[in-house]
Image (cartoon, helix red, strand yellow):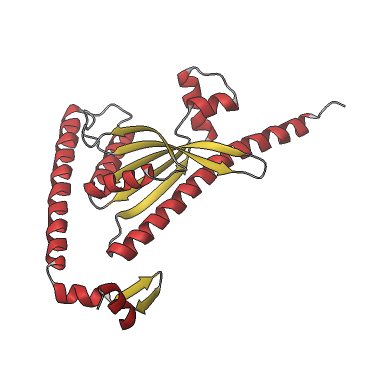
Amino acid sequence: MEISKVEQFRIFKNEITRFMMVYKFALDAIDTKLEILKEEFQILHDYNPIEHTKSRLKSPESIMKKLFKKGCEITLPSIRSNIRDIAGIRITCSFISDIYWLSEMLKGQSDLKILEIKDFIQQPKENGYQSLHMLIEIPVYMSDRQEQVCVEVQIRTIAMDFWASLEHKIFYKYNQSVPQHLLNELKEAAETATALDRKMEMIHKEISEIKESQPEDLEEELKQLRIGNQQFQIPEDLLRLISGT
């Protein structure tokens, strides 16, 4: 029996939907991992290295444009093999050291496979752009199969993110033809952002050292235990057991 055009379209639409869904679920999985890392670090160190995150899925139109540009075959397996930034997540951190700490945490997750790392912090792009890019493969478990899905992760500081946002707006306004004097000023602004990042990290380190040098306050703080929204007092008997007295 011949399948009607409507039914053919319905089947094709379902295939596209399932194809895009796995990338959405991959982003959800990465988000969950980041939330766990954030809460763990907040509880143990009273500090959150992740300011905020933003995830996005490429639209089917954008995927097709990139596929045509690459001159690749127009099939779903071809898209999966050749377009590796369909799912993307941007993580904004407070300090440069947080970026590398977070990347090491992701590297240490046994179910994640690191496919590629591009460090535009140690080696900024010619225009001044800085960020750490990671291409990560994560398993997604569907009702009838498991798929390894590629996610692009960009990690940067607040200053780096502000610069990148401004640069994008300028290029969008000028339709890629930006006057040379603005390009020069953008690069100078990138250098200023780098200097600010380093200065703020130095201040943060000094504040941490001052806090650690106040033993009385630290001792009282260590007697408190906070898990999620609940706070507990560690029993004296347990404290004696730990201290061996």
Counting from the top left corner in percent of width and height, residue 30 is at 45, 47
Q: Residue furthest right?
A: 1
Which quarter of the picture shows residue 231? bottom left
Screen quadrant of the C terminus: bottom left
Q: Residue furthest front?
A: 244
Which quarter of the picture shows residue 174? top left
Q: Is residue 206 above or below residue 134?
A: below
Number of marks in the rendered image: 0
Q: Is residue 198 above or below residue 223?
A: above
Screen quadrant of the N terminus: top right
- Residue drawn at x 35%, y 47% as measured from the top left: 105
- Residue drawn at x 41%, y 57% as measured from the top left: 36
Closest to the observer, 109 or 242: 242
Q: Is residue 64 visible?
A: no
Q: Is residue 83 visible?
A: yes
Left or right of 40 on screen, residue 195: left
Q: Is residue 232 above or below residue 72?
A: below
Left or right of 9 on screen, residue 68: left
Counting from the top left corner in percent of width and height, residue 20 is at 57, 38
Q: Residue furthest top?
A: 71
Closest to the observer, 96 or 169: 96
Closest to the observer, 2 or 116: 116
- Residue drawn at x 38%, y 40% as measured from the top left: 153
- Residue drawn at x 31%, y 63% as measured from the top left: 44
Counting from the top left corner in percent of width and height, residue 146 is at 60, 39
